Image (cartoon, grey):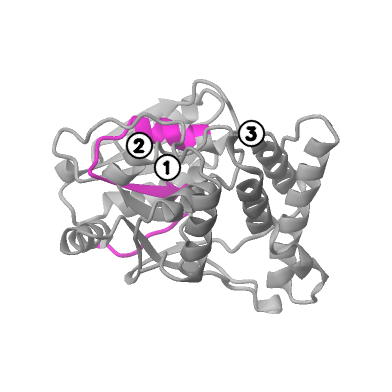
Amino acid sequence: MANNGFRATVLQGLYRVFPFNLSGDCVVNLASDGIRISCVINFYGRLDLLSGILHSLADQTMPIDRFEVVLVEDRGGTEDGKRCAESFSSVLQMRYIPLDGNFGKMGYSRNTGLAGSRGEIVLFLDDDTVILQKDFLESLDRIFLSNPAVDAVAPWGRASYALLVDRYDYHDPFFMTSRCTAYRRSVLASLGGFVSDFVGQEDVEFVTRFTIAGKSAMNCGELAYFHPPMLVPNLRKPKAVGYSFYGLKHRYPFAIWVLLLANCARHAPLLLLPIRRFREQGRFGFGFLCGVIEGVRGGEAQYYS
């Protein structure tokens, strides 16, 4: 199980001393219409990448009436995005949702997709995730059915390409991230989904509440996906994430907020190391800290899109 051990003990111990509301900002309705799995994908543009994951899902062996795809497009949506969704409607149960506000906030976008889904299991995917196993969804469903105590499944993440010069492939194969993690709907409902105001790292914050609540996750090497390795070409995105995180300090006791901050920025010292993989992780952590500092200073909101 992914959430056993020292981390869970520390988080749950702190929560007993510094309790807070574990609910996110989403009202999650009951599953309906016999849907077993909802695949929720948040995107904006990048339709060449999006079509790749949609083709992967269209090739699944699971019967089409047992799963659905929920697409949420940022910035009110686009005609091209809508047409892309419609082009797959003959081979997938498709729902296209243009985001109605809070543009650029991944927490709100994830919640919009979650609220619009119907499945007993909710699988969050990125638009640049690639799934090659045609029985991925059927196997995922079987794993949940065979393990009733498991609340979430984290498949094995592999790099869709590697930076061979720097030997940079992938650094955390079993990480509970929205690029490819599945949850029981009942767990997402009990925790209220995501915190809407997060620009990014909304999945890291959710997993913290998931762990505090004593929920159980399984690392599953039987299921695999591919995703680009972490690249941070500039500090715009991590600074925006850090700034949004600072603005949410009122939601948590100070000790918990500091712990979340340390978790998101923990790789910052790696920026000093010569290895490419570590520098990329370090650049994100450093940018995140810069965004938090900008929030402390009362600076202007940070954006990256």
Please give left or right for residue 74 compared with residue 33 in the image.
Answer: right
Which amino acid type is shown beneath numbered disc 3? His
**Earlier sequence position, callout 3 versus callout 2:** 2
Q: Position of residue 89 (x, y in %)?
A: 28, 35
Residue on which disc 1 sits: 41
Q: Position of residue 229 (x, y in %)?
A: 59, 64
| Local SS, label 1 | strand
Which of the image's four quarters has the C terminus? top right
Whole-Å distance between the Cαs marked 3 and 2? Answer: 32 Å
Q: Position of residue 293 (x, y in %)?
A: 81, 43
Given residues 25 and 14, the one toward you in this image is: 14
Q: Residue 245: within the magenta?
A: no
Place residue 64 in its image quadrant.
top left
- Crowding at mark 3 (Cα within 10 Å: few <14, some 14-19, many 20+): few
Highlighted magenta segment, given as a residue range: 108-135
Q: Residue 111: within the magenta?
A: yes
Residue on which disc 3 sits: 250
- Crowding at mark 1 (Cα within 10 Å: few <14, some 14-19, many 20+): many
- At 51% from the left and 26% from the top, the residue drawn is 78
Place residue 66 in its image quadrant.
top left
Please give left or right for residue 136 compared with residue 25 in the image.
Answer: left
Whole-Å distance between the Cαs marked 1 and 2? Answer: 6 Å
Place residue 156 in its image quadrant.
bottom left
| Local SS, label 2 | strand
- At 18% from the left and 40% from the top, the residue drawn is 35
**Earlier sequence position, callout 3 versus callout 1:** 1
| Local SS, label 3 | helix
- At 46% from the left and 36% from the top, the residue drawn is 24
Residue on which disc 2 sits: 70
Q: Quick check: marks 1 and 2 in contact, CB under 8 Å?
A: yes
